[in-house]
Image (spheres, grey):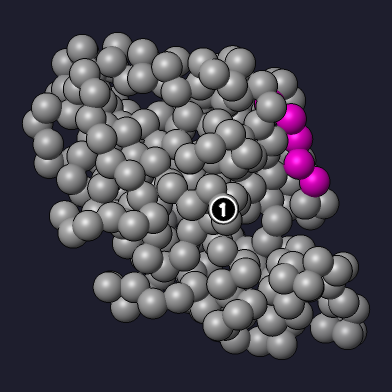
Amino acid sequence: MERLEDVRYATQDGVAIITIDRPERMNAFRAQTVDELVACFEKAWVDREVGAIVLTGAGDRAFCAGGDQKQRAETGDYGPSASGRMQLDRLHRLIRDVPKPVIAAVNGDAVGGGHVLQVLCDLSVAAETARFGQAGPRVGSFDAGFGTGYLARIVGEKRARELWFLCELIDAKTAKEWGLVNRVVPAAEVLPTALEMGRRAASLSPTAIAFLKHAFNTDTEHLAGTQRLADEGLALFVTTDEAAEGAAAFSEKRPPRFGRFRRKA
C-alpha cells in the first residue's frame, strides 16, 4: 500500500482501524481519499490477523461529510486520483463484500455520501452529538442505489424519503430509534466501544461470520445493479448546469436557485 495522505490505517487487537483524516474539510472525501479507503479495506481483507474493521473520522466534528463539494465547485470534479476515477462504487462493494464485520464509529456528523458509508457498515456506534442525513438534492447530487434502497430497508420508506426529500439532519437519539445505529454513547467512548465490538467479533469463528454476512447481504444484493444504473446517471447529471448550481451555491454559502430547472411535465 502506497503512502497515505487522506486516510490513516492501524491495527489493534485483531481490529483494523481506518480513519478518514481530513478534519479541515469535515472529513469529506475527494477521489484520492476514496482510492486510499479502497486500498485500506483491501489490506484489511487479506490480513489474516484482522477479524473486524472500524471506520471512523478524524476529530470530533464529523464522521464524514460526503463528497468534497468545495473541490467540486473549484474543479468541476473530485480531483485527480491514481485510479483515474472516483471509485465510490468499489468502496461500497468492499464494505459489503469484505468477509469481516465493518463497524462505523460515528464520531460526528455523517452527511450525504458519508451517511451512506455508515449505512452500509454492518454495525454503527454514534456519539451523542452526531447528526445524520442526506444532502444530495441541496448540492446537486444524489445516490439512487444503496443510499436509497438499502436506507429504506433499514429505516422504512417514509423515513428514507424524509431524509432525502427534506435534507434535514436528525440527532443520534432519533437515529437509534429509527434503527440507523446500534448504540449511542458519549463522544469519548465512540472509538473504544467500536473497538470492543470489533474485538468481540474478531474472537468468533471467521468462517461463520463470513457466511452470515453474505447471507444478510443476499436479500439486498439486487441493489448492486441499481447502484450501477445510479452511478451512470449521476455521472451524466454532474455535468449539467443544475448540478453546477448546487455545487456553486454550497461553495458560496447561499441557497441554491433550482427553480429554472423544474420541468413542466
Inspect this view and state whether residue 103 appears. Answer: yes
Residue type highlighted by circle 1:
Glu
What residue is disc 1 on?
A: 24
The residue nearer to you, when weighing 55 against 26, is 26
Quarter holding the C terminus is: bottom right
Instruction: Describe residue 112's horizontal placement relative to residue 100 as left or right.
Output: right
Quarter holding the N terminus is: bottom left
Instruction: Describe residue 52's horizontal placement relative to residue 177 as left or right.
Output: left
Instruction: Say above or below: 259 vs 70.
Output: below
* Identity of the residue drawn at 72% across and 21% down: 173
Residue 39 rendering spot, x and y as whole percentages: 24, 54
Inspect this view and state whether residue 218 appears. Answer: no
Over which residues does the magenta segment extend? Answer: 168-172
Q: Quadrant of residue 240?
A: bottom right
Residue 187 rendering spot, x and y as whole percentages: 59, 21
Q: Quadrant of residue 44?
A: top left
The residue nearer to you, when weighing 89 against 170, is 170
* Identity of the residue drawn at 60% across and 30% down: 180
The residue nearer to you, when weighing 61 against 236, is 61
Q: Verify whether residue 48 appears in magenta.
A: no
Instruction: Describe residue 238's horizontal placement relative to residue 197 as left or right.
Output: right
* Identity of the residue drawn at 18% across and 45% down: 43
* Identity of the residue drawn at 74% across and 46% down: 163
Q: Secondary structure at mark 1?
A: helix
Residue 13 rendering spot, x and y as whole percentages: 21, 18
